Amino acid sequence: MKKIFEISRWEFLEKVKTRAFILSLIITPALVILISIGGTLISANEQESTKAIGIIDSSMVYYFPLSQTLEDYKLDNGQPAYVVFNLNHPTEDFKDNVMTADRDVYKNKIAGYILLNNYGDSLDVQYRSSSSGDFKDVQRIENAVKEVRIKIGLLKLGVNPDLLRSSFGNISVEQVTVKEGDQVRQSDFISEFLSAIVFIMLLLMMIIYSGQMLVRSLVEEKSNKLIEILISSCTPEELLAGKILGLSALGLFQMFIWTCIGIALAGTSVIPPSAFNNFFIMLVYFILGFLFYTALFVGIGSIVTTEQEAQQITSYLSLILVLPIAVSASAIFNPNSLLVEILSFIPLTIPAIMLLKINVIDVPPVEILSTIIIMIASIYITIFAASKIFRIGILSYGKKPGIKELISWIKEK
């Protein structure tokens, strides 16, 4: 055990002093926070200036009520969000009006315009602009057209349209999650989703960074024959255990620093305190996932002999880590689907999928316990197989072994 701790201490101190590791302590969480909440903050911000919006109405029935409805929208500073113009020129026909309006949009004279074609009982509505990302404008225009259309219909029936606003007042729906034992809690989907995504991205980036660092160090130690000196003073199993322990300590140290940064930001609007609701159980899956992938990197990394082979190995393993992010939408909106249930019991995807599920639904304790047992068993089997491969692979040079040869190494007593 003394040699294992000496190797792990040496591995930890050698890696923790590198410039790349020190930069990763700051740059990695900064990138994760920027990516995870940057889009939300941008989409939540109101437009800063009033937009010029035009209307071309073939029947001229909707222009006046629609313009009044759109001008009711206000910016944060109280100014109108839209200034509406009538683009129906009486001296031009309908097609010429459309062509003129298209040119105005292309030249940025107006932000866009609403094109209404009234065909009796049907209404064709288009919003034509130079950008395809005006989702908020399109939603507002859609709601305004619906409101105006209902008002016109009510007026035809002799009903006061002001009843519409009183009938459809501001109604907000508060989401409450029901848990076992008659317990309920308010749900904050955004913070819960972001906390899970942040954990997955941190796990992904830490595994990729640590795995690449480990594989490259193994290649470097094999190329300069340092590995042979280490093996002369300890067994391959002790060297493997020391490297895994040292790398795990390095990863936990990273996680500790990142957690401190997260707690410090929890008091601000950047990271809400509710993001730490399931922190400890998420930390368990985080550590188990890190140990599992570390053992994979050690076992597979011991058979490579060149930098190019090391990059290929880490790239393939990294693609597996991206899979949970690809199915994150399914896990969030349909956490009880068959695909999510299957991925919840596969060791390669258990950590990331469970990080998502425990923040979305009340996962039964039996499922949590069973997935943890599967991860622990998988870590043991992976370390056992990795030790067999590591014992022979670290002293193997030249041709990379095939699958059959690797199996024979694992079976060898």
Image (cartoon, helix red, strand yellow):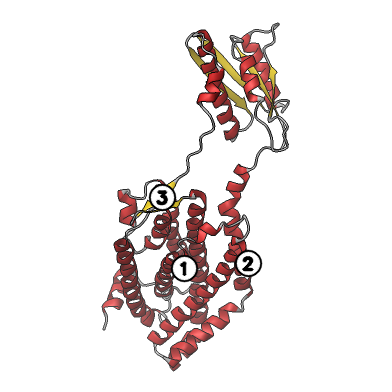
Q: CA distance from mark 3 to mark 2?
A: 35 Å
**Residue 237 location (% of width, % of height):** 38, 85
User: Which label belongs to residue 26?
Assistant: 2
Residue 21 as seen in the image, left or right of residue 185: right
- In the image, which is nearer the foreground, mark 2 or mark 1? 2
Residue 365 appears anywhere in the view? yes
Q: Residue at x 37, y 82 (%)?
A: 391
**Residue 197 location (% of width, % of height):** 49, 56
- In the image, which is nearer the foreground, mark 3 or mark 1? 3
**Residue 159 location (% of width, % of height):** 51, 12
| Category of crowding for the residue at label 1, using alpha-carbon neighbours closer than 10 angstroms: few (below 14), some (14–19), many (at least 20) | some
Residue 224 appears anywhere in the view? no
Labels 2 and 1: the sequence-earlier one: 2
- In the rendered view, tell whether residue 412 sits above or below residue 329: below
User: Which label belongs to residue 177?
Assistant: 3
Q: Residue at x 47, y 62 (%)?
A: 315
- In the rendered view, tell whether residue 255 sits above or below residue 58: below
Q: CA distance from mark 2 to mark 1?
A: 29 Å
Q: Residue at x 65, y 20 (%)?
A: 68
The residue under label 1 is: 309
**Circle 3: residue type:** Thr
